[in-house]
Image (tube, rainbow, N blue to C red):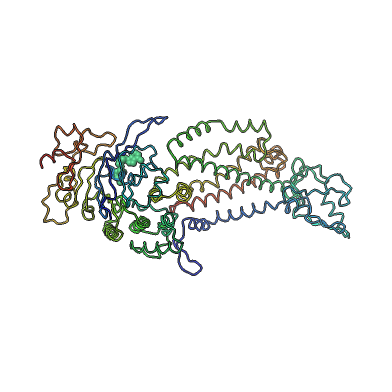
Amino acid sequence: MMEKNQNNDYVSVSINRRRWLKFKGLKRGYYSFIALIILYGLSFLLPVLINSKALIVRYEGSYYFPAFLELIPGVASYYPGEKFGQDIPGEANYRRLKQKWEDGSDNWLIMPVYPYNPYEDITTEGNKMYEAPSRKHWLGTDNTGRDVFARLFYAFNISISFALILTLINYLLGITIGGAMGYFGGKVDLFAQRVIEIWSSLPMLFVIIIMSSIIRPSFFLLILIYTMVNWIFLTYYMRAEFYREKAKDYVSAAISMGQRNRTIIFKHILPNSLVPVITYFPFSVVGGISMLVGLDYLGFGLPPPTPSWGQMLDVGLQNVSKWWMVFSPVTAQFLTLLAIVFIGEGVREAFDPKVYSRLR
Amino acid sequence: MSQKPVVEVKNLKVHFPIHGGIISKKVGTVKAVDGVSFSIGRREIVGLVGESGCGKTTVGRAMINILHHVAPDVEISGEILYHFGDETIDFGKLTSHEVRKYRSRVQMIFQDPYASLNPRMTVKQIVEEPLKLHTKKTESERRNTVINLLEKVGLQAVHADRFPHEFSGGQRQRVGIARALATNPDLIICDEPVSALDVSIQAQVINLMMDIQKEFDVSFLFIAHDLSVVEHISDQIAVMYLGNLMEFGPAKQVYHHPKHPYSTALLSAVPIPDPDKKNRKRIVLEGDVPTPINKPSGCSFRTRCPVVEESCSESTPVLEEIDLKHWVSCPIVTEKQ
Ligand SMILES: Nc1ncnc2c1ncn2[C@@H]1O[C@H](COP(=O)(O)OP(=O)(O)O)[C@@H](O)[C@H]1O
Ligand SMILES: [Mg+2]
């Protein structure tokens, strides 16, 4: 396949470029990819998009940026109500302040697009339980008066981050260990295989549930627990790929010209053995998300009040008559997973050496 | 120039252990190469022929010391002595670090042109890799060298930035040849370099190799199963059967006056282009090639030999010089002389 460059000359296209072009041509997967990338990127800006803190406060000649401060980890964004002349205990209620200053005051403030945060419940003045969707709460409130719409989006960020980090760590471990087994073979392989066989025969689901009921798991502890189970799966792929690739003559050629082990592994074998794990990547992310939802649903997941789809589903199902509490997490999850599956389908097809292999 | 041969192979044995069971106990051995000796002189082309599975590739791979890579537990014995200038080197006796230094002196052209080029590298990157390793050339010098080499093997400069999948089998094999030449080796081992190509392309590639051999002053070990190809290109021919050499001698001698019954049979299978000369009797070998796991005792060819005698099963025959530089490993033939 040839392609034109800036000078209008035809140049050859590398395999990866060809795959990217093919992936781009598969609209469903490509648009899902773009949409998810944008949404996930935006979800890191959630504190300035969906938040009960004001973006900018001007109070008696000074400016304050509480919502922006929340973007910076480790910086306090807390201002007590007294600071802005509010007669309430604890943090300032910016929505109230806005109402108060509306009629002809020198002080003013700008709220984010959606002025609720995912943690504020009925203890914050003005919030009610089980509110149906309205212009105020777009997707209503839940059993503790928390805004469902806000929780949905914060949970999106957490779910995707969880699944991505989990998958990346799994990949790193699986590729390294599986690759080493395949490349060095012999005793290394034999030993590692036995260890993996023993390890994989542990009933991991029970181990996880037991562990999470003893220690309240945090985000990273959950990832650690899951990684213990999941990396094994990838070693099977990588081991087989490395075995197959290293027996090919281009590797023999590299050795016979005196190339170093390191270069052979990273430059020759690795790029040629990643196809199965790359095509599997999106589905691994799907697996990570579903796993987190499942554990949260069962109550062994992230500690409350962390926004999570599984927890929302759980309380939703306890209050089925409040349709928005069920409908919201289910739809969010469904759309996200669907988009990732579309991406996965596109990736799989882009990496497929056969031209017509899709079921039509 | 010294008169020493480029390489002397002395009693080379390559045995692959077969493992079985959960603790991978050794349950047998594949005697792929079982005592092979020959030498390749400077600027000489030695043809190595034999049926498929008789151990030709294994000999070639043992000579470039890459068997351990795919089969870590392979057992290799004997000597492979290279004479590079004044140095005498046996890869098997060096550490893997020391071996790397000398690897550039012996190169291999592989049988399958589709597997021997990394699909992710452009032709330039492929041919340049040995240059990066063994020379201190700058980027632009390397590019020039690559283009030079490509032109030598019948490709053009425009091919440098293409990927292997854009080439035909014959062209890929040319890239493989260019890569082998890049280190300016003393010996090139060609493992059936044309058997995967169309017949029409085969002749071109063989002629190219003959030109290159003259121009670059290198020795060749040319492995093939087609005797007529080997006769055309080689100075010496070695005939191999089930891990042993049966006959080794000047190409013309071995081709026109084969001494060993196996060589005679192999030759009778070569189609004769000239119908007037069709007076050769075709010898069809009976039975299958025995496996190298369970080799017959004594002479490994005795189970299919047309002139077999009682004594053949008793002792393993050794190569004996029956003519000047013409060795045969068959006591019956030797006695008749
Ligand atoms: N890595 C290996 N492990 C076990 N047996 C092998 C290995 N490589 C080659 N063999 C065996 O060695 C014998 C010779 O093979 P090979 O050298 O490829 O023959 P040829 O090139 O003449 O066709 C065959 O019986 C083959 O099965
Ligand atoms: Mg072979």
* Closest to the observer, B94 or B51: B94
What is the x, y in percent for residue A136?
77, 51
Quadrant of the image containing the N terminus of chain B = bottom left
| Picture residue at 30% right of the left edge, 42% below the top | B79
The C terminus of chain B lies in quadrant: top left
Instruction: Name which residue lies at 21% across and 55% down.
Output: B232
Q: Is residue A278 left or right of residue B278?
A: right
Find residue A77 and report its horizontal and vertical position in percent.
Answer: 78, 49
Query: Can you give x and y, in whole percent of width and height, for residue B156 in the image?
Result: 37, 65
Q: Nearer the viewer, residue B125 or B62?
A: B62
Q: Nearer the viewer, residue A322 or A184?
A: A184
User: Percent position (x, y) of residue A167?
Assistant: 57, 44
Indicate left or right for A167 with B238 as reference: right
Judging depth in this view, the residue of A283 and A148 nearest the camera is: A283
Total count of labels = 0
Please report the residue visible at 59 percent of the width from the left and 33 percent of the height from the top.
A205
> Which of the four quarters of the rendered structure image does ligand 1 lie in?
top left
> Which residue is outermost to the front?
B86
Is B191 placed left or right of B121 in the picture? left
A330 displayed left or right of B126: right
